[in-house]
Image (cartoon, rainbow, N blue to C red):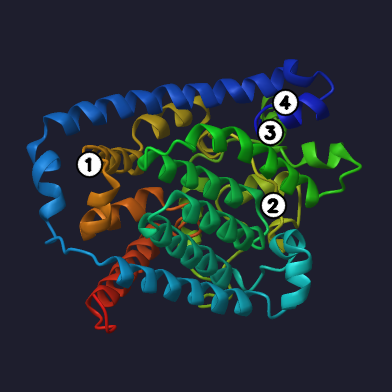
Amino acid sequence: MTIFAGPLFILQKGLFDYWFNYALCMTNISLFFSLLLVIITLKFSNKNNFIKYKFMSIMRPVKLKKNRMLFSSIFFLLLFFLTFILLTRDFGLLNWIANPREGYQLHRVGNGQWYALSLLFLSVSFTLIMVYTKTVLKTIFVFFFYAFLIFFLGSKGFVLSYFIFFLIILWYRKSKYFKKLFLILPPIGFFLLILNFNPNNLADIFKYFDHYINSAMYYEAYSKGEIKLYYGYIWISDFYHYLPRILFPDKPYIYGLLHVNEFFWPGAAELTNTPAFGGPLAAFADFGILGVLLSSLFNLSLFVEIIFYFILYRDNSLNNIRENSNKLYLFIWILAPSFMIFFGSLYMIILFILIIKIIATFNKLKIGFK
C-alpha cells in the first residue's frame, strides 16, 4: 500500500507513470541482489559450526527471571517518559500531545537526541513486556497501550512497526488469534492514520505515501541532466550522522542523502522536514545502477543481520528466549520495533551494551520475591 497508494492517486498516469516504474525497477534490482546475498549467507551459516553451535556461548548465558524483566521494562518505560518530556520542552508537552505530527516534523531541531532516545527506550520496554507477558489477552492489552504511546512520536511508520512486532509475538506463541488480528488490526491502523489528517480530504492521506513519487521525480531529473551523480560524496558525508548535534552544534544540516533533498526542497533539511525517497536512491545517487548493484550484494549489515536471524530461528521457542539472556539480547537487537533507527553503528554498540547492563542489573536485584 505504501508503495502504490500515493502514485495511484497523485501521479497523472497513476501506476503507469514511466519514472515511477523506473524507481520500482531500481528497487527490484536491489531486492534481487539482496536476496542473492541472503541465500549465500544462509548457506554459509548452515555449514559453519561456529555460527551454529558456539556463537551464542561467546558470552556465558544467564537464566532470566520474569519479574525482574518486568521491572526492567517499567524502568525503560520511565526513561521514555523522561526523554519525551525533555523532547517536548520547546514546543510544549500539551502542544506536542495535541499535534504529534507537527512536533515530529517541525520541533525536533536541537532535541533530536531526546527523540531518538525516547523511541529507543519505548522499544526496549515494549519488547521486554511483550516477551514476558504470559497470556494472549494481556499481550493484546499491552500492545494497544504501547501503540497509544508510540502514536505521540508522530510517525505512522512506528505504529506499523509495533503492529508487526505484535504479530511476530503472536506467531511465536502459536496463538489462535494470529489470523483474526492480522485481518482486524490493519483497518484500525488505517483509521488512526485518517485521524492524523483531514478525514474529509483523502488526497491529504495519499500524499503521505509520496516516497516513490519523490524517487520518480529524482530519476526524471537525473535523466534530463538536471542533477549529477555524487560519486561517493553522499556515502562519505553521511558519516556526519554519527555526530550528535548537542555535542557538535556546527554539524551541517545537509549531509548524506539530504544533498538530494536540498536540490528539490531547499531549506527543508534545516527544518528537519525532509520528504523521504523510496528504494535504493542513495546508492544510485552516488554511482548510478552500479551503485545499486554493489551496495545490495556487498551489504555487510544485511550479512550480519541474516546470520543473527539464522541463529535466533534455529530454536524459535519463546520460552528459550525468556530464560536465556543471550537469546533475549539477540531477539531485542534484530526484532525490537523501530530499534536504534536514528543511531550510527558506534552509538548503537555503546547503547546496546548499556541496555544489556541495565537488564543484567535488574536480573540480579533482590526485590523480595522469587
Residue under label 1, please give it.
311
Residue under label 4, please give it.
224
Residue under label 3, please give it.
218
Using the image, determine if residue 103 lies above or below residue 331.
Answer: below
Give the amino acid at mark 3. Answer: Tyr
What residue is shown at x 26% (from left), y 79% (from top)?
A: 369
Picture coordinates of residue 316, whole percent (x, y): 27, 41
Tag in front: 3 or 1: 1
Give the amino acid at mark 1. Answer: Ile
- Pick whichever of labels 2 and 1 is earlier in the sequence: 2
- Pick whichever of labels 4 and 1 is earlier in the sequence: 4
Residue furthest right as drawn: 200
- Pick whichever of labels 2 and 4 is earlier in the sequence: 4
Q: Are marks 3 and 2 in contact (CB under 8 Å)?
A: no
Query: Circle 4 sits in a helix, a strand or a loop, which is it?
Result: loop
Cα–Cα gap, marks 2 and 1: 37 Å
Q: Nearer the viewer, residue 286 or 56?
A: 56
Q: Are marks 2 and 1 in contact (CB under 8 Å)?
A: no
Tag in front: 4 or 1: 1
Query: Circle 3 sits in a helix, a strand or a loop, which is it?
Result: helix
Tag in front: 2 or 1: 1
Q: Can residue 246 be seen by looking at this rendering?
A: yes
Cα–Cα gap, marks 4 and 3: 10 Å
Using the image, determine if residue 346 lies above or below residue 277.
Answer: below
Q: Are marks 3 and 1 in contact (CB under 8 Å)?
A: no
Q: Nearer the viewer, residue 224 or 319?
A: 319
